[in-house]
Amino acid sequence: MSDAYQIDRSGNTLFDATGRRFDAERRRWLAATKKKSAGKLEELDSIAAVNWLQRESSYPLREPIGVIGPRAPPPPSSPPR
């Protein structure tokens, strides 16, 4: 695997090979700019980058859960006669 990503752990920032910055909150890549990082850049492969996104980025991807049905329970039914 190649080192296709760089991370600044102190700045909580992920960059790709073209210099784009990943916005973990909105889940999108932002245009390439000069890499402004507060800390040291560390090389990561794809698996390590995804691991960081899920566990350390403060914005893990979670599957939505839906509950279908009314909020209140139905009224009790009368006993059969």
Image (cartoon, rainbow, N blue to C red):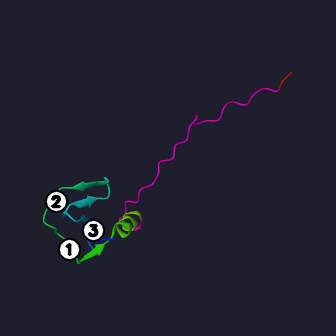
Magenta stretch, main secondary structure class: loop
Residue drawn at (52%, 43%) of the image: 66
Q: Which element is circle 1 on?
A: loop
User: In this rendering, would 6 be left or right of 67?
Assistant: left
Mark 2 or mark 3: name the one nearer the start of the chain.
Answer: 3
- First to last magenta residue range: 55-79
Q: Report the Cα–Cα distance between label 3 and label 1.
A: 17 Å
Q: Report the Cα–Cα distance between label 1 and label 2.
A: 17 Å
Residue occupied by mark 2 = 32
Discs 1/2, front: 2
Residue drawn at (16%, 68%) of the image: 35
Q: Please name the amino acid that badge 2 sits on.
A: Ala
Does the magenta-highlighted stretch encompass residue 69?
yes
Residue occupied by mark 1 = 38
Q: Residues within 10 Å of mark 1 (few under 14, many from 20)?
A: few
Residue occupied by mark 3 = 5
Dots 1, 2 in contact, CB < 8 A: no
Q: Please name the amino acid that badge 1 sits on.
A: Ala
User: In this rendering, would 23 be left or right of 75?
Assistant: left
